[in-house]
Each structure stands twice: as C-alpha cells, then as structure tokens.
Image (cartoon, helix red, strand yellow):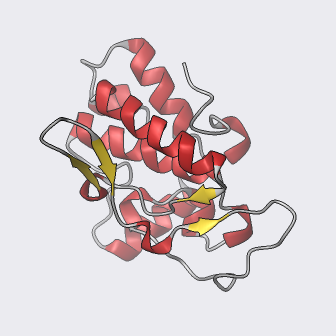
Amino acid sequence: VVHHGIALLEVLERAHAAGIVHRDLKPENLFFTTRQELKVLDFGIARLRDATVKATTTQMGTMLGTPGYLAPEQALGNVNDIDARTDVWATGATLFTLLTGRPVHQGRSAQESLVFAATRPAPPLKQYAPHVPDHVALVIDRALRFRREERWPNAADRV
C-alpha cells in the first residue's frame, strides 16, 4: 500500500505542478498496468487551478466527487478552497480504505457520509488498523486533517 501511495503522490506531484487538481481520487480510479505502473483514471472532473482567478468551472455549493473520498471543503461545496490539499486528503482517504477495508467516514447512506465528511475529523488510522507502522499512520493522519492548513500542502511535500 505504501509503494502504491508513493506512486500516486508522484502522479499527483506532476499534475499539481501543471496546475491540475483531480478532485475524484479513490481506489476505483487507480489502475496498475502489467508492468506495475500506476495510471490515475477519470480526470473528468479535474480542473486547472489558477491561484489568481476564482473558480468558475462549477458553482459554489456544487459537490463533485465520491462522498467517501471528499475532503471537508469539497463536501461543503467550497469550490474556491479546492486545491492540491484536497487531492492530498483524498489520497489519505484512499490509503486509509486500502489499509482498513472501510471508508474514513462510514455513514448509512451517501448523504450521511457526506455530512460526516463536512463536519467530522477523520478518525486516527491506528483506530482501525493497529498493525500499521507508526510512521505510516502519522503520514496518513496528517493527510486527513480536517483543516486544510494542517495537511501536507501538496503531493511533493511528503516524508
């Protein structure tokens, strides 16, 4: 999982350097070739991020993405707050799911999961995967911080 997480961060590093935010990272959008090269699929809702221009590709309050992998700002529909840290959160959520077998926020419905994503911090990874080494859990837990300012700032800034 750690090897695949690093591969995903390398893809995101290139995308973010080009100003592209994926906005729908999840296990189903990761594909490994027969040579074990990672391909990130479904850039269908990705957008170019220009820090000098307000987001205009979607309306404020419009939620795009998959509820189990939405960062709080995305779950709230705050499109102007969606940036590389949003993809960092989704990467953390993907690794959390791969290591625990459950989503970060487990609601009884997609709507309840969305509410949880918008209002609740992620549980610590070790709560559901005590077997994970501490240093791996710390990296993923930081990626899943509720406040954007406390997350890794981008895919390139990692341990």
User: Measured from the top left, where is residue 59 in percent x and y?
Assistant: 67, 86
Quadrant location of the N terminus in the rendered image: top left
Identify which residue, 134 or 58, lies in the foreground.
Answer: 58
Question: Is 103 situated left or right of 65 in this image?
Answer: left
Image quadrant of residue 37? top left
User: Measured from the top left, where is residue 123 in percent x and y?
Assistant: 43, 39
Identify which residue, 48 or 139, lies in the foreground.
Answer: 48
Residue placed farthest to the front in the image?
A: 35
Observer able to see residue 153: yes
Residue placed farthest to the right in the image?
A: 52
> Above or below — where is 40 with respect to 36?
below
Q: Going 63% across and 62% down the picture, which residue do you hit?
A: 73
Identify which residue, 149 or 8, lies in the foreground.
Answer: 8
Q: Going 66% across and 81% down the picture, which residue do you hit?
A: 57
Q: Going 35% across and 46% down the picture, which residue do you hit?
A: 94
Q: Number of marks in the image?
A: 0
Quadrant location of the C terminus in the rendered image: top right
User: Measured from the top left, where is residue 39 in percent x and y?
Assistant: 31, 49
> Above or below — where is 13 with respect to 140?
below
Question: Is 158 situated left or right of 107 in this image?
Answer: right
Observer able to see residue 122: no
Question: Is 115 situated left or right of 4 in this image?
Answer: right
